[in-house]
Amino acid sequence: MTNRPRLNTQGSLVAGLAAVALFAVLAIVFLGVSFPAPAGFPDGAAITKSLGAAMFDIAPGQLMDEGQAAVPAEGFLVAFLLIGVLLDAALDGAVMLAKREEDGENVGLGSGTGESEDAVAADGGAPVDDDRDGGDD
């Protein structure tokens, strides 16, 4: 006989009703909002140079070549910096997750765990063969 998952009706339904009500409110808000017509940049707009000028507080006219127009880039600057912070946090998290651990303690090279000093950190935990000539010394 197989056991199938069953719906748990023992608890209160208040949390479920609150989630459905929140979904309804958000759906009404998102469907009722009106967005302005999209507008593009003028021909010859130098977006990257304008962003660099805003980042380093330089007058955009100093960086523009002839025929290039400056774009107000302060709005881009906030998004650019937020993306940089998020990518940095993701990189830090990836490094933390990639650390090897034994019994809850970080393991590094030469940490007294029996690894030789010339072991490679990316060895996947494989033992290092110190006998490189292949003999049975």
Image (tube, rainbow, N blue to C red):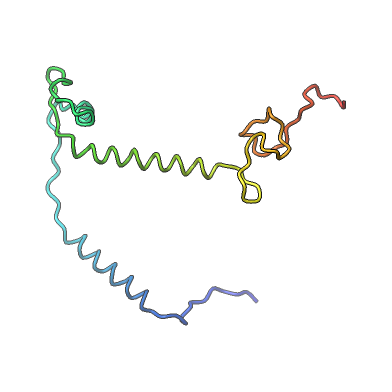
Residue at position x 29%, y 67% from top?
A: 23
Residue at position x 32%, y 73% from top?
A: 18
Residue at position x 18%, y 37% from top?
A: 74
Residue 36: x %, y % from top left: 12, 49
Residue 48 appears left or right of 94: left
* Furthest-front residue in this view: 112
Residue 94: x %, y % from top left: 49, 42
Kindly indicate the quadrant of the structure image that contains residue 111.
top right
Q: What quarter of the picture does the C terminus occupy? A: top right
Kindly indicate the quadrant of the structure image that contains residue 17.
bottom left
* Furthest-right residue in this view: 137
Residue 45 appears left or right of 100: left
Residue 94 appears left or right of 56: right
Q: What quarter of the picture does the N terminus occupy? A: bottom right
* Furthest-bottom residue in this view: 10
Q: Quick one: 48 or 52, which is closer to the camera?
A: 52
Q: Quick one: 49 or 105, which is closer to the camera?
A: 105
